[in-house]
Amino acid sequence: MATNLALDPSLIDRAVAVSGEPSKKAAVTLALKEFIARREQQRIVGLLGQLEWDESFNPKAERSRK
């Protein structure tokens, strides 16, 4: 999909330099992937303390092959 964006050239240059990617497109693609991954991780961390755990669950007992 072709998309035209007005991006800060200095940010693009820094992204290419820091990422080591061979092109601007590759650097922006990598940056978007990392941004998405970080936001998803933050959402998961936000769940800490909100989930109810079954204290009687024993994961080691579940691994038993008896």
Image (cartoon, rainbow, N blue to C red):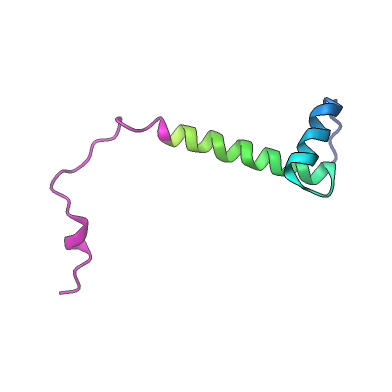
Q: Residue at x 46, y 32 (%)?
A: 43
Q: Residue 65's image quarter?
A: bottom left
Q: Is residue 45 left or right of residue 53?
A: right
Tell me the magenta residue range: 45-66
Query: Measured along the vertical axis of the image, is residue 32 above or below residue 66?
Result: above
Q: What secondary structure predominates along the stretch shown in magenta?
A: loop
Q: Is residue 55 left or right of residue 14?
A: left
Res. 4 in view: yes
Q: Position of residue 47 (x, y in %)?
A: 37, 32
Query: Furthest residue to the bottom?
Result: 66
Q: Residue at x 17, y 50 (%)?
A: 57
Q: Looking at this view, is 8 or 39 the one in front?
A: 8
Q: Position of residue 26 (x, y in %)?
A: 78, 46
Q: Residue at x 23, y 65 (%)?
A: 63
Q: Position of residue 62 (x, y in %)?
A: 20, 62
Q: Is residue 57 magenta?
A: yes
Query: Measured along the vertical axis of the image, is residue 59 above or below residue 51?
Result: below
Q: Residue 31's image quarter?
A: top right
Q: Is residue 20 magenta?
A: no
Q: Residue at x 83, y 50 (%)?
A: 22
Q: Position of residue 53 (x, y in %)?
A: 22, 40
